[in-house]
Image: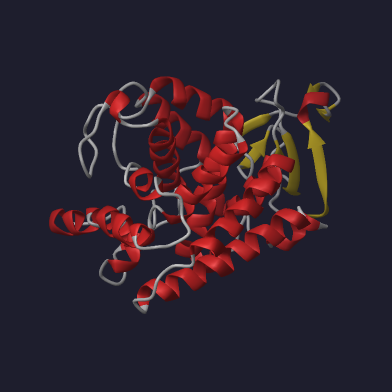
Amino acid sequence: MPRARTAFTQTNAIVQSMARAVLSGNALDGERAKQAVAAITDSVVRNPDAMMLLVTMRDKAEETLNRSTQVSVYMTVFGRFVQLERKRLELLGLIGLLQDVGMLKLPPGMPARRSDLTGAEEQTFKTHVTHSVEILSQTPGLPADLPGLASLHHERYDGSGYARGLKGSAISQMGAIAGIVDAFDLLTAPAPYGMQMPPSNALNVLFQNRGTQFHAALIEQFIQCVGAFPVGSVVELNSGEVGVVITQNLVKRLQPRVMVVQDANGNPIHPHKILDLVNEPMATPDEPYRIRRTLDQTTVKIDSRELFL
């Protein structure tokens, strides 16, 4: 976790610097972007759960900034899951980090209203893809194929997406991955940035759209990758206690490791209690602990620094 936090903090500082460069009309620093993604990839290869937990429980004070880092992390984790080679993982991370850089060219406040735009505003919003391609094409030090790949995250398998209305195999694997992760981010991001769904509900929406908006096999792999209860999910246990999923069980996805942070009456628990559900710890003399349901992410307020204790 400390190493993941260092990579996360450094990446956000770099993204903030790049944002200032774009807003002032200067070029991005492609080399620094690659360094940030290399650090994320190192962390993901070591322990994907650590970085995913960190970005999920992050401070919401700089939501737009942190979201680009979160998308980059999720894309890298997914790429690792489908066993892409290191070079491809770093390219996925760059796509996630930079594909929405064109939003900085939109009218102020518009990106924060992504889920609540009028028809005319929606058309303006879609121009961020073109802006991203232009900015990345003019940035030295980035992979030559990055601008084209960054233009694909709103394309959909059935041809209903934008900017070019591509469909099926015309969307590369990386473009399809970017589209899935971007959609998951929109579904789970807090209002007004997104629809504020619990992660498990968002996965269900993606599953319902497999084979239409999204590549069916990749959707199923993405769900396997993040699990029924993704790392960072806030869950209610059958005891009435509330916890945060901190580690996946790669074999039994319904039995992750949970950090219990509230008792059944809603009182904070200190120190936090760690339950590895695969070991079937007992909630009562007759019943082992199990997850009853997923709660809204805002149910529990946790200082992310507590995750490093």
How far across and how far down the image is residue 202, in percent? 45, 37
Foreground residue among 257 and 13: 13
Q: Is residue 88 left or right of residue 280?
A: left
How far across and how far down the image is residue 65, in percent? 49, 64
226 over 216 or under it: above or below: below
Q: Is residue 102 at least partly visible in the picture?
A: yes
Q: Is residue 34 left or right of residue 156?
A: right
Residue found at the very far left of the displayed protein:
120
Q: Is residue 243 at least partly visible in the picture?
A: no
Foreground residue among 122 and 135: 135
Foreground residue among 301 and 130: 130
For the image shown, how many numbered marks are present on the structure? 0
How far across and how far down the image is residue 194, in percent? 39, 52
Q: Is residue 8 left or right of residue 23?
A: right
Q: Is residue 289 left or right of residue 146?
A: right
How far across and how far down the image is residue 155, in percent? 29, 38
Foreground residue among 98 and 242: 98
**Residue at point 30% right, 29% down?**
213
Residue found at the very far bottom of the displayed protein:
24
* Image quadrant occupied by the C terminus: bottom right
**Residue at point 42% right, 25% down?**
207
Q: In terms of image quadrants, where is residue 166? A: top left
120 over 235 or under it: above or below: below
**Residue at point 59% right, 62% down?**
11
128 over 160 or under it: above or below: below
**Residue at point 23% right, 53% down?**
126
